[in-house]
């Protein structure tokens, strides 16, 4: 699991070891964990499967995720696991309009909690992405583009 991997990698992270210094078994685990993490951001079963297959393969993953950044990926994964990113007070205290893009099929962040964020501030609008998980850029790129252009024009 990810927690165990981060624990096993801690000595390498502390000494800022190069990717090539990490034992092969741990490197394979890095790619397996990242493939699962990315798969959880997607909603389309084919995209999930592709993530699991492609990113779990070191030689493919290296084309997408430069290995010199390996410790940054692990820091991000660790933060995702251990930190509570609670944005309720930021939404509540905002005086500017907020659009909340909600991936209705998100495994990472259940839509029910995201939808409730709009109740915290009358300046909030919810934009549901009904066919998307946490990554509308992949799941619904055309709708995301339209929403970004609309936002930029306002």
Image: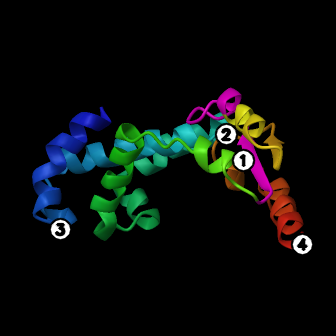
Of label 3 and label 2, which has the lower sequence position?
A: 3
Query: Which percent across, then down, holds residue 38?
Result: 50, 45
Residue beneath disc 2: 133
Q: Is residue 4 left or right of residue 154?
A: left
- Between 69 and 64, the one lying in front of the other is 69
- Asked whether the beta carbons under mark 1 and mark 2 sit within 8 Å of each other, the answer is yes
Instruction: Look at the image and tell me whether residue 121 can be seen.
Output: yes
Instruction: Look at the image and tell me whether residue 104 can be seen.
Output: no
Residue beneath disc 1: 139
Q: Residues within 10 Å of mark 3 (few under 14, many from 20)?
A: some
Task: Let me know if residue 78 is in the magenta part.
Answer: no
Whole-angstrom CA distance, mark 1 to mark 3, is: 34 Å
98, above or below 39, in the image? below
The magenta span reads: 96-113
The N terminus sits in image quarter: top left
Residue beneath disc 4: 153
Q: Residue at x 63, y 30 (%)?
A: 110
Residue beneath disc 3: 18
Of label 1 and label 2, which has the lower sequence position?
A: 2
- Asked whether the beta carbons under mark 3 and mark 4 sit within 8 Å of each other, the answer is no
Q: Residue at x 39, y 42 (%)?
A: 83
Q: Residue at x 81, y 37 (%)?
A: 130
Whole-angstrom CA distance, mark 3 to mark 2, is: 33 Å
Check disc 3 and report its element: helix, strand or loop.
Answer: loop
Whole-angstrom CA distance, mark 3 to mark 4, is: 45 Å
49, above or below 62, in the image? above
Q: Residues within 10 Å of mark 1 (few under 14, many from 20)?
A: many
- Of circles 1 and 2, the one toward us is 2
Q: Residues within 10 Å of mark 4 (few under 14, many from 20)?
A: few
């Amino acid at each position: 699991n990810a927690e165990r991997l981060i624990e096993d990698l801690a000595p390498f992270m502390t000494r800022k070891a190069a990717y090539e210094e990490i034992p092969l078994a741990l490197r394979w685990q890095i790619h397996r964990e990242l493939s699962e993490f990315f798969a959880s951001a997607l909603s389309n079963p084919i995209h999930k499967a592709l993530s699991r297959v492609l990113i779990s393969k070191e030689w493919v993953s290296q084309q997408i995720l430069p290995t010199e950044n390996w410790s940054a990926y692990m820091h991000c994964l660790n933060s995702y696991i251990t930190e509570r990113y609670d944005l309720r007070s930021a939404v509540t205290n905002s005086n500017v309009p907020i659009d909340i893009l909600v991936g209705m099929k998100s495994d990472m962040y259940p839509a029910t909690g995201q939808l409730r964020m709009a109740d915290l501030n009358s300046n909030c609008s919810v934009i549901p992405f009904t066919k998307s998980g946490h990554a509308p850029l992949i799941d619904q790129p055309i709708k995301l583009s339209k929403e970004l252009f609309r936002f930029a024009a306002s």
